[in-house]
Image: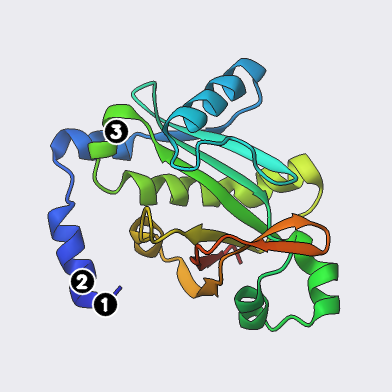
Amino acid sequence: MSDQSRQMFEKTTRPNRRQRYLLDNATIRLLDDQAEIERWNDLIRTHHYLRSSNVAGKALRYVEEEAGKWAALLSFSSAAYHLKARDSCIGWETWQRRQRLALLVANSRLLIVGSSRSMPNLASQSLSLALRRLREDWRGAFGSEPVAVETFGDPEFFEGTCYKAANWTVVGSIQGFARQAADFYQHHGKPKTILMYPLR
């Protein structure tokens, strides 16, 4: 996003006083209660464009709350096994990717809930709040500490503006293949943008 585009975006998305108060007092927490996880799953299945709460491998689920109400849902999970553009950006050879893939995690879901969808800057703030605690939470749950996060922008549904506003970087794109098995990728014809954010 250019400086001029960012300024125009910020002018048109400036929160009012009540919205600013809610944003300033928002909290985020990691879900560990099974009933809350089921509620999270139901909301994702109902309202997220992918219509699925299934995420790959290890996973953490978060909720951002404003005045006690669920405002945003996020999940972080195991990173994609192989992404040519990502691996090239990092500088990984195949053997390095195999050894170090656990250092990456994926932001696999982000959903703004209900009336909170009209809240300016909520998505980028939710990302920022979650990323501040992700390394510690991931280490506590899985014993390793991630150094970067990846996600995908799907041009058919969204451009990734909230990620760019939160200082994520576009590192390339995927050509429309999805992993179906350990050594088999199936073409689905829907290219996506790869964005990354360094945690350290």
Residue 128 x %, y % = 45, 51
Which sits earlier in the primary sequence, circle 3 or circle 2?
2
Residue assigned mark 3: 116
Asked which colour scheme the image uses, the reply is rainbow
Q: Which residue corresponds to the image point at 68% horizontal and 60% vertical from the top-left?
A: 80
Instruction: Describe the element under mark 3 as helix, strand or loop.
Output: helix
Instruction: Please tell me in which quadrant of the rendered image residue 9 appears.
Output: bottom left
User: Within 10 Å of the Cα at label 2, are there few (<14), some (14-19), or many (20+) other Cα atoms?
Assistant: few
- Quarter holding the N terminus is bottom left
Residue 2's tag is 1
Mark 3 to mark 2: distance in Å?
24 Å
Residue 129 x %, y % = 47, 46
User: Within 10 Å of the Cα at label 1, are there few (<14), some (14-19), or many (20+) other Cα atoms?
Assistant: few
Observer-nearest residue: 189 or 17?
A: 189
Mark 1 to mark 2: distance in Å?
5 Å
Q: Which residue corresponds to the image point at 61% horizontal and 46% vertical from the top-left?
A: 76
Residue assigned mark 2: 5
Mark 3 to mark 1: distance in Å?
27 Å
